Each structure stands twice: as C-alpha cells, then as structure tokens.
Amino acid sequence: MKVRAKFDAALAACPLIAILRGLRPDEAQPIGEALWRSGWKLFEVPLNSPEPLSSIERLSRAFPDALVGAGTVLEPRQVRDVHAAGGRMIVAPNFNVVVVREAVRLGMVCLPGVLTATEAFAALEAGATGLKLFPAEMIPPAAVKALRAVLPSPTLLLPVGGISTGDIAAYRAAGANGWGIGSALYKPGMAAAQVQSNAQAFFAACAGTMQA
C-alpha cells in the first residue's frame, strides 16, 4: 500500500496521532502494543526524544501496518534520517518549505504546523499532506471553522496541543479531520497499561463523533 493511501486508511480507522515525546527505544515495543491494541495506527516520535531514530526503527519494524514517523522535524537532513530509519511521516511545529519539499520528494506524509491562513495556503502549495493546527490552544473550534470555509475542501486539518477527550466533539463539528495527542496520552516513563487506558478513552471520544 502506498504511503498516502496507508495514511488515509489509518486516519479513517482512528483519526488520532500518538505523539510520543520522550519515548525511549526500550519502551517502543510495549507502548506501541498498547496503542495498537487500542485501535491507534499513527505513531509519532518527536526528534527531541532520547534516540528517536532507534525508536522509529523499532516501531516501524514491530508494527508494519501502522504509519510511523517523527515530530519536531526542522531540517531536510532530519527528513532523510527519518526515512532511512523506516519512518514515513514527517510532522513539524512550523512550516518550512524545504522540509515539506524533501518529504514530498521521498514520498512521505508531511504535516507541517501552521497558525494562519497564509501559512496554511503556502504549506498546501508546497505539497503538504495535511495541516497541523498548532498550538490548538490558539486555534479554537471557531477558528478551525473559519479556516475550513476558505481552504480547499479536501484539506486535512489536525489540531494539536492541549487536546482533551472533551474537545473532540467541538473540533469535529468545526471541521477537524483528526488530532495529535501528546501528554494527555503519554508522558516519559508512563506504564504501558496507563497509556492503553488513555488511548482507549480518546478512541471512544472519537468513535462517538464518528457515529453522530
């Protein structure tokens, strides 16, 4: 399955990206299993985590049906490093045209961070797969609705930053396609059982909006 098709299928099954900031390589397998058992299929390891490329490699190998990638990707060199480690998804807190273009060149999913309509349109023109609306604390559902009104209808919008289970329904109604979940899902050193419990709670919140 091509990377974009795999991403679309994963997002349709569970529109949640696990942001595993601080994950250690030895935690990759148990945390990955906790997420996979809870229905999650999109795993992101930020590059400011300990040995992130090793964790990405382990997750990619252990969960071939998941789409694994990196967050906090700031330079084209890092895009290449993630690709070499088996990652196929690039997520950034900002929009950097050279990062997006390198990800596109390598056939990877790319979700740059944007805050304004100007950044959003520029990122789409550069070839972004979708838009990470970051930080979501500054982009409430009303702002998502306003962006949705002017962006091309197929544009994928994913609020990230401080999202809780109680936020999902309002963002969904405003036009969000998915969410990145960080510390509300996983914190460094958290037991896999707790991660699984958190993951199941978010999955249930999403399932409720998908059924509505």
Image: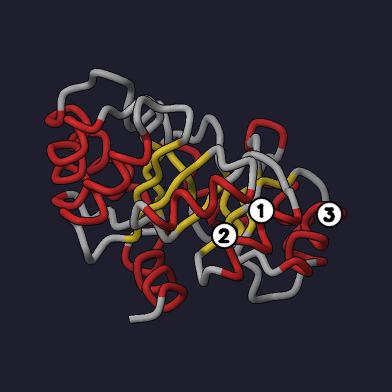
User: In x, y percent, where is residue 49?
Assistant: 40, 27
**The quarter of the displayed image where residue 110 is located:** bottom right
**Could you tell me which residue is drawn at 26 percent across and 41 percent down?**
199
Q: Tell me how far mark 3 sits from mark 1, CA to CA.
A: 19 Å
User: In x, y percent, where is residue 79?
Assistant: 54, 52
**Could you tell me which residue is drawn at 68 percent across and 63 percent down?**
101
Disc 3 marks which residue?
117
Q: Nearer the viewer, mark 2 or mark 1?
A: 1
Please rate how many residues cluster around mark 2, counting C-alpha atoms within 10 Å: few if below 14, some from 14 to 19, many from 20. many
Q: In the shown orientation, is residue 120 left or right of residue 205?
A: right
Q: Tell me how far mark 2 sits from mark 3, CA to CA.
A: 18 Å
Amino acid on which disc 3 is placed: Ala
Name which of mark 2 and mark 3 comes first in the sequence: 2
In what quadrant of the picture does the C terminus appear?
bottom left
What secondary structure is marked by label 3?
helix
As drawn, which residue projects farthest toward the bottom?
1
Please rate how many residues cluster around mark 1, counting C-alpha atoms within 10 Å: few if below 14, some from 14 to 19, many from 20. many
**Could you tell me which residue is drawn at 44 percent across and 50 percent down?**
82
As drawn, which residue projects farthest toward the right?
118
Q: In the shown orientation, is residue 189 left or right of residue 153?
A: left
In what quadrant of the picture does the N terminus appear?
bottom left
Q: Nearer the viewer, residue 95 or 14?
A: 95
